[in-house]
């Protein structure tokens, strides 16, 4: 069940809603990262040990995920 918001959601003028929206987007990003990486690593270990791009794929996407986390937890300004 999706979360309920007590007022009309307005990303531009409501910092609490913007913070919640950014965290939900981060959760979706984490879920996609885990689903894709687990599938890629499963097939890499199961069938294709000659896939050399798998490490780079995981580290680059993991780095982007880390930057996303740093942005929503430290850089984003939710005061206005």
Image (tube, rainbow, N blue to C red):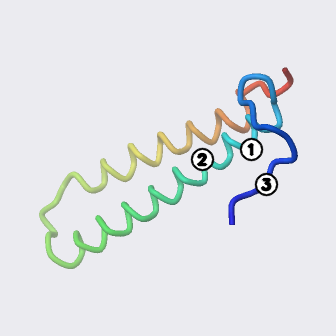
Point 74% across, 31% down: residue: 10
Image vertical order of residue 9 relative to residue 80, above or below: below
User: Based on the displayed image, in which of its 4 quarters is residue 21 positioned?
Assistant: top right
In this orientation, which residue lies closer to the viewer: 18 or 31?
A: 18
Q: Position of residue 61 (x, y in %)?
A: 41, 46
Point 52% across, 50% down: residue: 29
Q: Which mark is residue 26?
A: 2
Query: Which element type, helix, strand or loop, lies under badge 1?
Result: helix
Q: Earlier in the sequence, mark 2 or mark 3?
A: 3
Q: Disc 2 to disc 1, how far (Cα)?
A: 10 Å
In this orientation, which residue lies closer to the viewer: 26 or 2?
A: 2
Q: Is residue 42 left or right of residue 6?
A: left
For label 1, the residue is 20
Is disc 3 surrounded by few (<14), some (14 to 19) or many (20+) residues within 10 Å? few
Q: Position of residue 26 (x, y in %)?
A: 60, 47
User: Based on the displayed image, in which of its 4 quarters is residue 71 positioned?
Assistant: top right
For label 3, the residue is 4
């Amino acid at each position: 069940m999706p979360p309920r918001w007590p007022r009309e959601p307005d990303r531009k003028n409501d910092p609490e809603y913007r913070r919640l929206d950014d965290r939900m987007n981060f959760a979706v990003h984490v879920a996609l990262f885990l689903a894709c990486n687990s599938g890629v690593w499963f097939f890499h270990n199961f069938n294709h040990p000659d896939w050399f791009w798998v490490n780079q794929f995981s580290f680059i996407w993991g780095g982007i995920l880390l930057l996303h986390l740093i942005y929503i937890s430290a850089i984003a300004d939710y005061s206005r």
